[in-house]
Each structure stands twice: as structure tokens, then as C-alpha cells.
């Protein structure tokens, strides 16, 4: 379910969370030139942002998808949610991006994941160690931008 990106949607539904509530599954797969590539930095984990009612998080345990919610006992049947610092989740995101960066190849279609070109698609026209030269074409712009490879995600055949 992580592979086909349906796990995030299922978790969002179980939590009754809005579409902009942060959920991060440290896993990515894409199909490019007929080959599926899989990346994960912490298999079996999903990270959900704080801010929902505590009961929503514990409600996840009633599904077949979640085995445990990070929490600690407070006496009796009470449990308190544990949190992970944002910096730790950002580090996991960074590790995943760095794994993917190695896969960026010349003439690959990519999507920019961060920075001023977030969400824009382009074509790699050159590789320079940890950067890629990306041709970005929009109605009002046609330019080659030098971008760090870790900011790019391959646009797979299955998108």
C-alpha cells in the first residue's frame, strides 16, 4: 500500500484528517523505463503530524494497517502520545531524497519537490555530480536551471 501511495489516503480517512494535515510515509516507488525502483528509509513506519484529537491517533489501532501508536502508559488504561521532533522527520525526508538523487539520469523526466520551482516538471539535460541541469518549459518560461539532484523526483511511467 505504501508502494501504490494508497496508505496515506487510508490513514487520512481513518484519522478523519484534512487533506493538508502532514502525513509522511518514508517510502517511494516509481516505474521508469519499465523498471520499478523502491526506496525506503524506515520500513514499516508512518509519521502523522500533531494537532488532531488524541483519540484519532489511537483509533488507528482498530485498523488492520497499524500495529502500534507511539505512546507511553500514564497509569491504569491511560496512554499519552509520544512525539518525534520535526527535525528527525526532516532528516528522514532528506535521506529519502538523497537515495532518489542517485537515480536521476540524463534525459529523465523529473518533478521538482522543493524550492521556487516546487511541483514543476522538467527534463534532465545534463548531470554535474550532485546537481542536474533541468529544462523547464512553461507558458512564460523556457530555461535550463541547475538544481540539486536531491530536490528532484523521477516522473515515472506510471504517473
Image (spheres, rainbow, N blue to C red):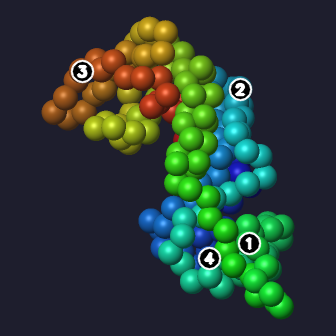
Q: Give the structural element (helix, strand or loop) at label 4.
A: helix
Pinpoint residue 23: horizontal percent, then vertical percent. 57, 60
User: Which label's residue is closer to the chain start, 4 or 3?
Assistant: 4
Name the residue nearer the viewer: 108 or 93. 93
Q: Which residue is mark 2?
A: 35
Which numbered disc, 4 or 2, marks the residue closer to the eye?
A: 4
Pinpoint residue 131: horizontal percent, then vertical percent. 43, 16
Quadrant of the drawing holding the N terminus? bottom right
User: Which label's residue is closer to the chain start, 4 or 2?
Assistant: 4
Pinpoint residue 15: horizontal percent, then vertical percent. 62, 76
User: Which label's residue is closer to the chain start, 3 or 2?
Assistant: 2
Q: Give the structural element (helix, strand or loop) at label 1.
A: strand
Q: Residues within 10 Å of mark 1 (few under 14, many from 20)?
A: few
Which residue of the protein is positioned furthest toward the bottom in this rendering?
Answer: 76
Q: Which residue is mark 3?
A: 143
Mark 1 and mark 3 residues within 8 Å of each other at the beta carbon: no
Q: Which residue is mark 4?
A: 15
Q: Give the label on residue 71, or none.
A: 1
Pinpoint residue 140: horizontal percent, then vertical percent. 16, 33
User: Which label's residue is closer to the chain start, 2 or 1?
Assistant: 2
Which numbered disc, 4 or 3, marks the residue closer to the eye?
A: 4
Amino acid at each position: 500500500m505504501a508502494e501504490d501511495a494508497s496508505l496515506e489516503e487510508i490513514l487520512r480517512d481513518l484519522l478523519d484528517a484534512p487533506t493538508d494535515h502532514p502525513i509522511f510515509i518514508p517510502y517511494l516507488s516509481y516505474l521508469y523505463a519499465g523498471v520499478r525502483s523502491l526506496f525506503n528509509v524506515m520500513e514499516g513506519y508512518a509519521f502523522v503530524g500533531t494537532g488532531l484529537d488524541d483519540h484519532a491517533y489511537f483509533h488507528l489501532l482498530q485498523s488492520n494497517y497499524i500495529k502500534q501508536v507511539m505512546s507511553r502508559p500514564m497509569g491504569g488504561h491511560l496512554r499519552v502520545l509520544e512525539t518525534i521532533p520535526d527535525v528527525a522527520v526532516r532528516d528522514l525526508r532528506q535521506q529519502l531524497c538523497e537515495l532518489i538523487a542517485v537515480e536521476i539520469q540524463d534525459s529523465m523526466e523529473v518533478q521538482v519537490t522543493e524550492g521556487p520551482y516546487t511541483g514543476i516538471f522538467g527534463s534532465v539535460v545534463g548531470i554535474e555530480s550532485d546537481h542536474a541541469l533541468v529544462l523547464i518549459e512553461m507558458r512564460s518560461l523556457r530555461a535550463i536551471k541547475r538544481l540539486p539532484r536531491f530536490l528532484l523526483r523521477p516522473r515515472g511511467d506510471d504517473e
